[in-house]
Amino acid sequence: MIVRRVTQATPAGSRRSKLAAMDLVRSSRWALLAAGLVACTASESEVRPDPDRIFYPTAVTVAPDDSVAFVVSANSDLTYDSGTVQVVDLAAVEQVVAAWKSNRTVPAGCSADTDATETLACPEADFLIDDAGVRIGNFASAVTTQDLGGGKLRLLVPVRGDPSITWMDWDPATRKLACSTGQGFPLCDDDHRLVELTGFDDPPGLPSEPYGVFADSLGQFAVVSHFANGIISLIDSPATGVPSLVDARSIGLAVGMSGIAGRQAGPDDLLYAQSVDTDRVFLFSVARPAGRQPALVSGGFFFQNAVGSGTNTGGVADDSRGIVFRDGGDRAFFVNRMPPALQEFDTSLGPTGVPVNRVIASTDICRQATSVAAADTGAGERAYVTCYADGQVYVVDPRGGGAVEATALTGRGPIASAPVPSRRLLLVANFLDDSLAVVDLDPTSSNAYRVVLRLGGKS
Amino acid sequence: MNSRSLFALAVVVAACGETGDAVSVTRRFTNPVDVAFGCYGSMKRTDSGETVVTPQPLSSCRTRAIGAPAFAENPIDVPPGQEGIANDAMFWYTAAVQPTAGTVTFAYTKLLGLADADVQTGVPEYGERDFTVDDADRYIPGHNALAVGASPIAIDTDTAGCHLLTANAGSCDLSVIDLLQVVAKGDTPIVSELTLTTAGGAPLLARPAALAATDLASPVGAACPPTPVGIHYVAYPDCHAVAAIDAATGRAVASIRFAADGTATLGDGELSCPRECGARDPIVDGARPTSLDIVRDERVGTQKLAIGVANRPVVTVVTLAATGLPATVSQVDLDGDVGVTDVALSEQITMGGKTGINDGAAGTDAQFVYAVASDSTVRVAEVLVANRECDTQVDPRYLLTENNSDAFICMAVGDPATPPRRAGARSPGVEFAGPARPVAVAIGAVNNKGGDGVPARPERLAGHFAYVALSSGFTVVVNIDDDNIDDTRVASDPLATQLPLVLPHQIRDSGFARDADNLNDGTRVCDALSPTPPSDVSATALVIGGPHSDANPVRIFSGASLASEKSYALPAVHQSLCVGTDGGVPVPDTNFSAPLDVRLATYPDWHALGFEEDWQFVWEGLLSNDRTDGSQALDGPQVRTGLVDIGGGGISVVDPSAPFCAAGVEPRDLVTLRGCDPSRGDAQCGLGETCFVHPDATVATGACLPKNRLDVLPSLCRDYLVSLRRYAVVDAFAGRLTLRERKRELRTTPITGCTSNEQCTTLALEDARLASPDHPVDDDTAAPDRTYACEPDTFRTPAQNRCVMTCQSDDQCDAGTLCRAGHCIEGIVPAPECASGLQRYDLRATDAFVAIGSRSGYLHPFIADSAGRCVKDPTAGPLMIGRVPLTAPPCTGTGPTDLTPNPCSETIDQVEKAPDYQPGTCELTTAGTKLVTRSTRGIRFQNPLLRLTFVDPTYPGDAMCRGDRAGALVDVPTVHRDASIQFRVVDGFLPRTMGDAIGQPANIVRAPDGAIWVVDGGDILPTPESGTDLRGQLVRISPRAPDGAVHLE
């Protein structure tokens, strides 16, 4: 019997520990100690995540130039000592997909899926850029990119296990993520984990359960929603400087803040935040008082009360799980679980200068939706909703009031997706089977809205 | 995975909220989106004479259900040749198509015939137990639907009634369902694929969006053909065409093609469409037809197809030949940049009449298309005669004198002869209150007039109506031609014939006894606050009688500014005289017992009223009515947060959310920097800040200061911290308000301006006396020790002098005000450090009552110009007003359409009960009061909902006793900040709905028997209160009994 000594990436310390997760680790240790008196101790290298694997992916995002994708693995079963952010070479993905679609070319190590003949299954290692990834804390929940210019990106990852907002920079020249001075598969260091607010004599810690994240490249800030309460955190993130956590405050009356996004990038970006607990959508913005740190400014809220409740009373929609803006902020898709619906809002500025915020389309979708993304890959815009329980992505055509155009079986526990518009692909992170599904978004393809490539997966 | 991993994973999953369903149910529907119908049962074959059990044309069941011709005096109730076959040998079938499952679910019920329906009682013909949801495969566990194809999105019945066809978006073909085999459940295949081709035989592989079948009036008695028959129209949005498909062959035989601008032309069946199934072609942008409706009008012998284009502002009507093929095409352009997502076509309607359906009688015929538009309205086009869009939002104030109902059939959009629209109307289309958007529309006829002498009631539908399914789950009725009520306003019966109740294309009202008056056996009861429910109306009905306030308007004010005994000195809602059994009584114009003409004038457009709304008119009130508990979002928060920009001797409030034009801020308005409430600790401050109250402060307002600068800022910011921090707006942009220091003024400054310092001194004493409860003869209130100068105040009222408080030191100013340059000011421009963080602030009007409704919010005409400056919208109507000042230009008339100037001033008789003193004393007589009528000045205010006159904007003062009005003051106001007049309007407009709310309606379909089927495509999730767990349902509503519904779940 081999017992691994689990050396977690999450450091000790009251402020830097997520009690639940750490307790879990501790109790597991005690249980294992009690059960197995004769035990070996695994070395640090043995519990280090496999750099060639995706495991419990919870988030995925794509570089603005569609060159690479960043996949966040949460290490949700604590097999390893840390989670990871890994980099997928999208050119390689596109090349393999194209060859597979055109003449059924099966690269070495890959195989045709026996259940879905249109799907090629490959080890993810073939597509992960060597030595590009980094290690982070456990239970990361989301990822966003901030464009630093010149192809350089900053990634911000809410990590529930620390809790922290872990950040790292991507340099297209070196094709590496950087968040420490370490080599190999480095763990992001303390300087790259935002765990407390700056500028205070007795700095408050990052509120618990960071969940969603949105970065505004022009405004040079990022905001984080916190699932356990009604708090939003603000990160000042100058393109040429180091990010810092500068504000954290409740911007509404709700708890369980979830989806978060900005309407139109820039210093005056109007931000929208949802909740799993209410049918309100909260509006806020970022102010930069002279001589003071940036701060969050609440801007009221509006109700999502245009769609039936499902309880025969009519008029409310809550348990919201994601927002994505389109058309320069003039429209937005909101995904809700209660009732299961994708709503399209007119968020254009009305004659008074404030957004209209009125529903223009709504579609019944799967239950337990987890995220929404959108892209136009040549046949008009579509919204893509990941359906955790059903293992599907719902493809919604929002035109004409909204309708489900297709459903794609992607794998178990799809939890997040990211379109790759120029390559006409959709990446779907399947939490429960450790895979990244690649969905064909080419409207002229006979495989449109089918998974054509699956990277990884439980064997 | 080891156990530890599993346990950890379970924890993680639970933490993420990814819980599985705990409820095990058998759901019989899976997110349906469309329904079609079948008629099945015994039938005498005309060729052999034998009686067989078979599917048959829908007209067979329809004739039995509602007669033929429908609504005729003596319709036949059995199809010719089918006599002797009882109704209980006949069945209705309903088929629901379910795209995500690729299935169709059938339900059936025994047919109830014409004589079975009790139109008098309105009892629904069918109960839920009458329907059986069919299990398509009894050998498989669970409740099974019929698999038909990939992503079927529409279904309809062929003209023979023997086959149903689905349009499959996932396979770009049709599926043919053999209804006989559905019933038989034998070994014969039930479903077959119908591959579609162009006229030339090339595959037609475009993705369909809608399907509608023609009705070629197949005779009842023929055997079922082996294949479907008739012409089916299929909408292909990405082909920019609608194809006429021969259902027997699957071949396109004709088409309606749409140019890029939406122009339609008739074409042949040789369509060139992109392939969208299997190998696919690129899609070219263009007009996208996505909705169809076909109506066969038996009375006039026509059959027409209506087409909606999702991304073009046009509705298309195709007249079909007897073969079902397109004969002619016409189009109506819609106003604005909208698309059409659903259409419904009416039969040819003889408009007008109030004695039940009168189609074909003398009168003007019309035919309408109702189109769900992308601006969340339902557009109406008349397509028989005028061929134009109809303006459904004409302000009824302008239509009161129109006695020709034909003028209302379709008022032309944009025609100079068409009166103005309702204030705030988004478009010519029918608008629905609240945020819900219309999803689908159906039109039907019903003739539940009731017997002779049976009064019209909201649920008693007779005529032609549109039924609109809203995203909120409600289905709303729209009157097209209500044949149970007058068609114009009747002067002798103005309450029952309010125009919003009788005009075509208006949402149907659900109020009962709208003509109720305060008469009891012919005698007027003046203290009646609400109508007595008629005996046939439940006392618990939500809306009874016309709109009225549920009590007398109340005046709320501060006792520190005005003694409660002197409330009469404040402005009030005008009162009229009611003469009844209880003698002459002054009654506020808002009340139920106000004279009829007054009440009608007070509520000029019932449609604009919510069924209940609280109104406040608050002097210098907040420009927002959002509740602080977050239960209401109308105008933004009452207390907002922004930055203060200080520099150049000025101060600005900057809010990155740019709310100021939307809030309706005007120059000279009042901004108060609210700081923080020290009783709440530091809760209202940012991190690192504390709520600091300066020890010198005389007002209990704190300010959020950085904790690490408390050694410096209290002294540096002392004057700012101890002041009220009120400022005057001098310039308003969407995101910035430029402010100036605001001088303290005497509230009793005459509204026409002061004339001298001495006058100000005299008025200051009057101001102080207002707070005294004493009669003037006994009032020994001392003259205040404040001094005033009569001088201009450019930041308040530039054109007149005001009584401004003067000083030489702070102690000569009121609490919270400071002495600067000889004037007391309410807030200073501080050093930037004093207000460097986020600041809480509120916005108030200056020198006006703010009219704000709990549902309407604060109405105003301001928008942002291209530079972001807040300016009046030149297109806003005169009713978009939310302020009532104490002075206004003279009114120019008294008619309902005399809307400008607004507000305006008038001289008006006020009826009231005045104190009745014994001569020469301030002792009241035994009666205490006396009824008086006096002429006074009033400010008339009109908004889309209300027309009110506020009397006595100023008070002359009393000479000897309270309320004797014998003082000599001229134009002196008594109002103070936050003094208000409040009332609640009840029994306003409540849209008539059908059935009850559902999850997410996907469609609404008119059945052959006149019933309306709402297709609920949404999930209903179980809650702690309800175990209901559905993935959609069908709801059958009989327009004859719209309160009830049959739910098939």
Image (spheres, rainbow, N blue to C red):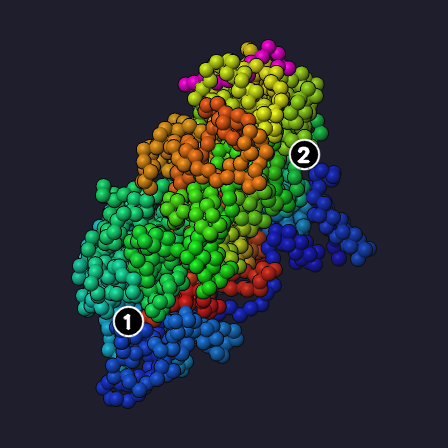
Question: Which residue is located at x 54 percent, y 51 percent?
Answer: A318
Chain bearing tag 1 is B
Query: In this picture, is B655 found above or below A428?
Result: above
Query: In this picture, is B545 found above or below B775?
Result: below
Instruction: For label 1, count other residues whose C-alpha is less than 10 Å away and answer few (under 14), some (14-19) or many (20+).
Output: many
Return the residue found at the far front: B919
Q: Secondary structure at mark 1?
A: loop
Kindly identify the amino acid type of the residue bearing the numbered disc 2.
Answer: Arg
Q: Is residue B805 magenta?
A: yes
The answer to whether any part of residue B919 appears in the image is yes
Identify the residue position indicated by label 1 in the image: B70
Closer to the chain start, of discs 2 and 1, is 1
Q: Quadrant of the C terminus of chain A?
A: bottom right
Instruction: Using the rendered image, report if marks 2 and 1 lie on a common chain.
Output: yes
A21 or B246, which is in the foreground? B246
Q: Quadrant of residue B274?
A: bottom left
Any mark on residue B715, and which?
Answer: none
Q: Position of residue B586 (x, y in %)?
A: 47, 43
Instruction: For label 2, count other residues whose C-alpha is less than 10 Å away and answer few (under 14), some (14-19) or many (20+).
Output: few
> Is B697 displayed left or right of A98 in the figure?
right
Q: Give the magenta part as a residue range.
A: B797-812
Kindly identify the amino acid type of the residue bearing the numbered disc 1.
Answer: Ala
Query: In this picture, is A179 found above or below B193?
Result: above
Q: Position of residue B68 (x, y in %)?
A: 27, 74
Q: Secondary structure at mark 2?
A: helix
B862 or A381, which is in the foreground? B862
Identify the residue position indicated by label 2 in the image: B680
